[in-house]
Image (cartoon, helix red, strand yellow):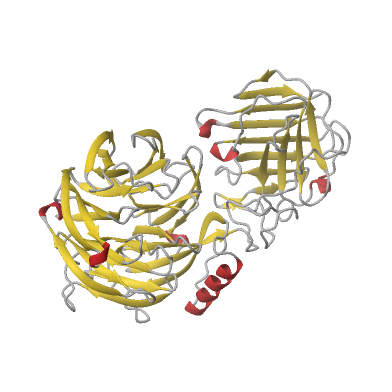
């Protein structure tokens, strides 16, 4: 990631303007870099004491932050750059903001709704056109709102749903957009320690977490009323997020310090457990997760861990919904990050926002963008544009492989190009092992300088009509892996090791030089969900080539027959 840099308001404005001029929807690459922080009682900013939840307007222009210690909601415009105002409980006729907890903006952008754990209420505000300032409309109270912690508006804008821990209820309200967004109570459902609620993008189902239960409801689109259809056992929910494609539901479980991943049946709404992401040697930043947000394109999920003082980024498999850890930004690497509670993604510009309770701040992070000239954790390359055909594609993937294998690559000894590919039902168990042994002479200089400039790419081709290459695996030059350099230089070889398996699942590479034929060898190993293995059963002959961006030398092996060639496994020795 790019180094820490605090930008001034003017600099941030230039960043936003340039992005909008280039592309209203840039290609995002997941990773984030800290940009700036809006801090309570600093530079005229107010209403952020105990900041704990954040929401972005549908047009991306405004950011709203609740502050439980200030009993307030703060307003920022220009994508979070400029402070506008704050509304405080008991001031100017405003009510229902004591210990303000969660916040959401209606899909039509006309209203902002804030829950209050202290007033057991919803504060309803009208939202103006730019600068997005608020006008108090009403306070809605009730036993079903006691200790209200979460609120969401249905995609059609007709209903509002809340989760209230002390009221042990999921409550339903009808929304009258023609009457200033006022609410009318419809019904409530019992749920012990109700803490999180979310609605599917199609509006057909509502999901609520509380106690040790995740409850799925079907939703009546006319009345908003809910009917329970299924339950799943959990630890202690803090937040829910549904992917924009409706395929998955993600639960931040503060009781178990994990993110639980569920597949969603779009017809029935029933959830099927897929996996758990927890802190281990490969995943960091998930102690006491408090909030989740899925990127608008569905390719990434952002989580904040309040105990670990971190924001964590996962790559999301848009087919299965499974997650792969991409990076963590801990407190020691991110100034002001000190007890993050809320996270939200801007739908228009590449910004992620974090509400930090102890720092009394709104933190702004820039998301890596393809074409900005900086190679992020989930990019193979970035040449400063989004044009394909120039070696770096429009999505910042290397085009070094080409649509057909290159000629003139150096060969291993007969039968010494060994390959094993495993495509497991569980993506994390996918594996690749390629060995190029006893090969043609290769000087160390012919491997280039992977510590600084030579990125390596493994390209796999077969003889089918499918687009070629079937798969690519990148080992970027000059990157940092788990706190140290990925590449290491020795007198006669280069080695690469990345326990985090980014960006393409490669774990280890060894490039052994040799002045005479039979001396050089190459070993490439990879595993995990980042490997993106397609269905196997390759059409033979198949070719595997290793290329780099610097020297023009390549190494390959051709496979005309196989030991195993099945839909989930390929194993062969070269010709």
Identity of the residue drawn at 34% across and 81% down: 44
Q: Is residue 339 left or right of residue 18?
A: left
Q: In this view, does 464 lie above or below 458?
A: above
Identity of the residue drawn at 45% across and 63% down: 334
Identity of the residue drawn at 22% across and 55% down: 174
The answer to whether residue 46 of the structure is visible from this angle is: no
Identity of the residue drawn at 43% across and 65% down: 59
Task: Tell me the quadrant of the picture where the C terminus can be found.
Answer: top right
Splitting the image into 4 quarters, where does residue 516 fall?
top right
Judging depth in this view, the residue of 410 and 15 nearest the camera is 15
Q: In this view, does 416 lie above or below 428?
A: above
Judging depth in this view, the residue of 451 and 255 nearest the camera is 255
Task: Tell me the quadrant of the picture where the N terminus can be found.
Answer: bottom right
Q: Which residue lies furthest to the top in this view?
A: 563
Splitting the image into 4 quarters, where does residue 138 fall?
bottom left
Q: In this view, does 144 lie to the left or right of 160?
A: left
Q: In this view, does 290 lie to the left or right of 383?
A: left
The percent position of residue 464, horizontal first and vertical second, equals 73, 29
- Counting labels gives 0
Q: Is residue 36 above or below residue 29?
A: below
The answer to whether residue 208 of the structure is visible from this angle is: yes
The percent position of residue 494, horizontal first and vertical second, equals 73, 44
The percent position of residue 437, horizontal first and vertical second, equals 78, 30
The percent position of residue 357, horizontal first and vertical second, equals 30, 63
Q: Residue furthest left?
A: 143
């Amino acid at each position: 990631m790019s180094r820490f840099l605090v930008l001034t308001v003017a600099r941030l404005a230039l960043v936003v303007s340039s992005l909008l001029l280039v592309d209203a929807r840039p290609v995002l690459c997941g990773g984030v870099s800290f940009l700036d922080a809006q801090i309570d009682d600093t530079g005229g900013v107010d209403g952020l004491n105990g900041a704990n939840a954040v929401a972005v307007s549908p047009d991306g222009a405004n950011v709203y932050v609740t502050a439980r210690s200030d009993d307030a909601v703060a307003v920022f415009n220009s994508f979070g750059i400029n402070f506008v105002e704050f509304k405080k409980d008991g001031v100017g006729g405003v009510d229902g903001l004591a210990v303000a907890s969660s916040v959401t903006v209606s899909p039509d952008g006309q209203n902002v709704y804030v829950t209050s754990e202290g007033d057991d209420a919803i504060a309803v505000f009208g939202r103006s056109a730019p600068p997005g300032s608020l006008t108090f409309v009403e306070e809605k109270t009730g036993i079903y709102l006691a200790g209200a912690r979460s609120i969401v508006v249905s995609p059609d804008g007709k209903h509002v749903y809340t989760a209230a821990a002390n009221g042990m209820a999921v409550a339903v309200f009808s929304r009258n957009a023609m009457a200033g967004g006022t609410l009318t109570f419809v019904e409530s459902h019992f749920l012990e320690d109700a803490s999180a609620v979310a609605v599917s993008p199609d509006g057909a189902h509502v999901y609520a977490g509380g106690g040790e239960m995740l409850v799925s409801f079907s939703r009546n689109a006319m009345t908003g009323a809910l009917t329970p259809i299924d339950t799943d056992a959990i630890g202690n929910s803090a937040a829910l997020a549904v992917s924009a494609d409706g395929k998955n539901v993600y639960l931040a479980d503060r009781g178990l310090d994990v993110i639980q991943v569920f597949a969603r049946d779009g017809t029935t709404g029933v959830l099927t457990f897929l996996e758990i992401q927890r802190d281990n040697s490969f995943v960091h930043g998930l102690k006491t997760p408090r909030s989740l947000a899925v990127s608008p394109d569905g390719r990434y999920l952002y989580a904040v861990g309040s105990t670990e003082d971190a924001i964590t980024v996962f790559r999301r498999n848009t087919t299965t919904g499974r997650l792969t850890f991409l990076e963590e930004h801990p407190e020691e690497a991110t100034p002001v990050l000190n007890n993050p509670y809320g996270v939200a993604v801007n739908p228009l510009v590449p910004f992620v926002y974090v509400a930090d309770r102890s720092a009394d701040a709104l933190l702004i992070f820039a998301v890596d963008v393809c074409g900005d000239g900086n190679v992020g954790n989930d990019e193979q390359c970035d040449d400063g544009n989004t044009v394909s055909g120039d070696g770096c594609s429009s999505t910042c993937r290397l085009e070094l492989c080409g649509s057909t294998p290159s000629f003139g690559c150096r060969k291993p000894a007969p039968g010494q190009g060994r390959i094993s590919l495993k495509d497991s039902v569980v993506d994390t168990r996918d594996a690749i092992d390629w060995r190029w042994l006893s090969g043609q002479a290769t000087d160390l200089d012919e491997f280039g300088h992977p510590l600084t400039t030579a990125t390596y790419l493994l390209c796999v081709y077969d003889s089918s009509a499918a687009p070629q290459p079937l798969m690519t695996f990148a080992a970027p030059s000059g990157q940092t892996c788990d706190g140290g350099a990925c590449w290491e230089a020795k007198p006669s070889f280069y080695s690469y090791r990345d326990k985090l398996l980014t960006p393409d699942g490669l774990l280890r590479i060894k490039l052994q030089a040799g002045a005479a034929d039979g001396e050089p060898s190459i070993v490439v190993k990879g595993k995990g969900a980042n490997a993106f293995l397609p269905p196997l059963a390759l059409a033979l002959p198949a070719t595997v080539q290793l290329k780099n961006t610097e020297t023009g030398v390549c190494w390959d092996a051709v496979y005309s027959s196989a030991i195993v060639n099945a839909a989930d496994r390929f194993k062969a020795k070269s010709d």
